[in-house]
Image (spheres, helix red, strand yellow):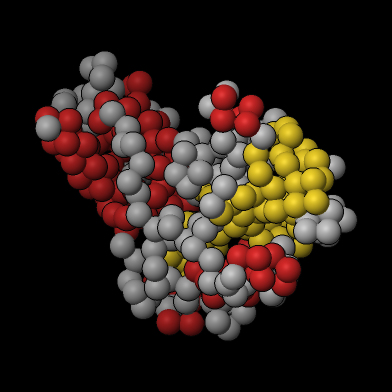
């Protein structure tokens, strides 16, 4: 029987199958021997061991489209990075670090700014101008007022998005508004876990429409992933990546070197100054860490 892992807790993997059932499964020992760990988002084959208790074993992990390190999830099509326009004001340095992290893991990003009921058109256009030139899709919503959700759903249709964002930006409100309480978790599984359906602190998949999923990662609010080498950092800024090799000197850091095409693009307004300043901050931060 085939299914998708939508949650993993304490050695059990909860697998949702096409018949609508959820099975509490253990992973076969062969996975441990081969150093393979099932991940939330994995498509798997299972065998039933105790039908009455809805228990089974995972016998095979089907080929993955991709897998992320942190959060440890599989088969995401893109990252949905949620920040608030106001309350709290966006921490743009943190947002740019999120984007670098996703670029490093080769995962496309959609940036969603929530709480537009506290903003105006001019502020939203300035945010769009900051990130769309780099190739990022920028969407504005008010999860509380249910504004802009159709645009977001249109982007997500038929795909699996892993959700990221700091606390206080309305991440849970957005997920609930999209899911409309349609989660994969059943009362039976809630009873087994001994917790309510919305209190989990573990990554889990929520089906928001047929073939459309959100991977909610409650702990994915900080970026303690392995940082790139500072010499590679500009590769993770798409607006710089395109002109990296046009600089006068090979291995240009795009900070003090003469004949730097990135700095020329900056002065011509082709690269937002804020993004460039954050690049410089990250570069120095990574370089300083390497010293120790």
| 150 vs 280: above or below | below
How many marks do you count on the picture? 0
Residue 77 seen in this snapshot: no
Query: Which residue of the protein is positioned furthest toward the top in this rendering?
Result: 250
Q: Position of residue 224 (x, y in %)?
A: 33, 46
Is residue 139 found left or right of 184 in the rendered image? left
- In the rendered image, the quadrant that contains the C terminus is top left
Q: Nearer the viewer, residue 68 or 228?
A: 68
Residue, x 65% and y 65% (percent of image)?
192
The quarter of the picture where residue 225 lies is top left
Residue 191 seen in this snapshot: yes
Residue, x 26% and y 19% (percent of image)?
251
Residue, x 39% and y 63% (percent of image)?
166
Is residue 125 found left or right of 89 in the rendered image? right
Query: Which residue of the protein is positioned furthest toward the right in this rendering?
Result: 19
The quarter of the picture where residue 76 lies is top right
Q: Nearer the viewer, residue 128 or 234?
A: 234
Residue, x 43% and y 71% (percent of image)?
169
Q: Position of residue 140 (x, y in %)?
A: 53, 68
Q: Position of residue 180 (x, y in %)?
A: 69, 75
Q: Position of residue 37 (x, y in %)?
A: 56, 36
| 76 vs 254: above or below | below
Is residue 210 found left or right of 65 in the rendered image? right
- In the rendered image, the quadrant that contains the N terminus is top right
């Amino acid at each position: 029987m085939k299914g998708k892992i939508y949650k993993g807790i304490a050695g059990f993997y909860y697998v949702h199958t096409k018949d609508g059932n959820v099975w509490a499964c253990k992973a076969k020992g062969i996975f441990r021997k081969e150093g393979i760990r099932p991940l939330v988002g994995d498509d798997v084959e299972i065998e039933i061991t105790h039908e009455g208790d809805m228990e089974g074993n995972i016998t095979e992990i089907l080929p993955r489209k991709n897998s992320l390190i942190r959060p440890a999830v599989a088969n995401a099509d893109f990252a949905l990075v949620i920040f608030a326009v106001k309350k709290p004001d966006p921490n743009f340095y943190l947002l740019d670090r999120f984007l670098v992290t996703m670029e490093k893991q080769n995962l496309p990003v959609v940036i969603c700014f929530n709480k537009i009921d506290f903003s105006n058109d001019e502020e939203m256009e300035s945010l769009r101008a900051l990130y769309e030139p780099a190739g990022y899709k920028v969407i504005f919503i008010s999860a509380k007022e249910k504004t802009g959700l159709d645009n977001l759903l249109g982007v997500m249709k038929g795909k699996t998005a892993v959700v990221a964002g700091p606390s206080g930006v309305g991440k849970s409100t957005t997920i609930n508004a999209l899911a409309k309480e349609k989660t994969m978790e059943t009362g039976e599984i809630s009873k087994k876990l001994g917790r309510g359906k919305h209190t989990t602190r573990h990554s889990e998949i929520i089906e928001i429409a047929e073939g459309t999923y959100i991977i909610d990662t409650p702990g994915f609010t900080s970026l303690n992933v392995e940082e790139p080498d500072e010499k590679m950092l500009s590769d993770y800024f798409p607006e710089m990546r395109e002109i990296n090799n046009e600089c006068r000197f090979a291995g240009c850091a795009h900070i003090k070197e003469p004949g730097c095409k990135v700095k020329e693009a900056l002065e011509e307004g082709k690269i937002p100054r804020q993004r460039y300043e954050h690049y410089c901050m990250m570069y120095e931060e990574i370089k300083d860490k390497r010293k120790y």
